[in-house]
């Protein structure tokens, strides 16, 4: 370290100070047994022993639009991911092609309203995740980040997700 420092330091007084600091430097090591470093009590036991109360965490907070939309965005992303994996694995292991399963659904003779409702339920995660994804992309550009704008875009996004999902369900 000193050789590198002396070439970088132009001041002779500072260079002398570095030399003195390096000469007076002492390092001492203490041997500690492994048993003394392993704690037998858990995090919760330690907090109880010290009289620390457990934080109430989420139970004290009033649900807000922003937190609910965030949780739903993660949830719809999870549902979409699991759905894609399920369809992919199902296509690999299925003994029939897709036309067989379409014929089975047609054989159920569901009413138009029932079929539209089922399609709406299946399409909603996509509609919600897509609409909220556009909202996040707008945030990434630095737009709509004030708290009033965050809430207004949240309401617009929920309405847009229902409209998008309705369009998909009516196809």
Image (cartoon, helix red, strand yellow):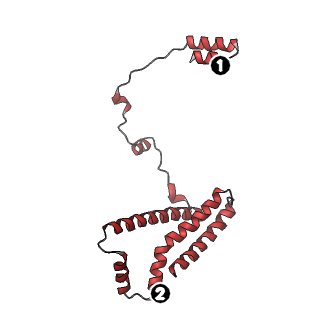
Residue appearing at x 42%, y 20% in the figure? 30
Q: Are marks 2 and 1 in contact (CB under 8 Å)?
A: no
Q: Residues within 10 Å of mark 1 (few under 14, many from 20)?
A: few
Residue appearing at x 38%, y 24% in the figure? 32
Label 1 residue SS = helix
Residue indicated by mark 1: 8
- Tell me if residue 64 can be seen: no
Whether 116 is drawn above or below 16: the answer is: below
Give residue 96's quadrant in the image: bottom left
Label 2 residue SS = helix
Question: Residue 41 versus residue 67: which sits nearer the camera?
Answer: 67
Q: Is residue 37 left or right of residue 67?
A: left
Q: Which mark sits nearer the N-terminus, 2 or 1?
A: 1
Query: Where in the figure is residue 95, as x and y percent of width and height?
Result: 29, 72
Residue indicated by mark 2: 113
- Point out the frontmost of discs 2 and 1: 1
Query: Where in the figure is residue 100, as x and y percent of width and height?
Result: 34, 79
Residue appearing at x 65%, y 61% in the figure? 138
Query: Where in the figure is residue 167, as x and y percent of width and height?
Result: 55, 79
């Amino acid at each position: 370290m000193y050789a590198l420092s002396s070439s970088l330091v132009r001041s002779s007084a500072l260079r002398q100070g570095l030399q003195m600091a390096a000469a007076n430097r002492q390092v001492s090591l203490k041997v500690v047994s492994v048993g003394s470093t392993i704690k037998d009590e858990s995090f919760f036991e330690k907090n109880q022993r010290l009289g620390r109360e457990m934080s109430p965490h989420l139970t004290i907070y009033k649900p807000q639009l922003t937190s609910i939309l965030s949780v739903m965005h993660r949830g719809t992303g999870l549902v979409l991911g699991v759905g894609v994996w399920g369809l992919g694995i199902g296509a690999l292991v299925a003994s029939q092609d897709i036309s067989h399963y379409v014929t089975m659904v047609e054989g159920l003779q569901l009413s138009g309203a029932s079929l539209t409702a089922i399609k709406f339920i299946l399409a909603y995660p996509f509609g919600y995740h897509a609409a909220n994804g556009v909202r996040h992309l707008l945030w990434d550009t630095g737009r709509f980040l004030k708290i009033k704008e965050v809430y207004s875009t949240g309401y617009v996004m929920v309405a847009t997700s229902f409209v998008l999902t309705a369009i998909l369900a009516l196809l």
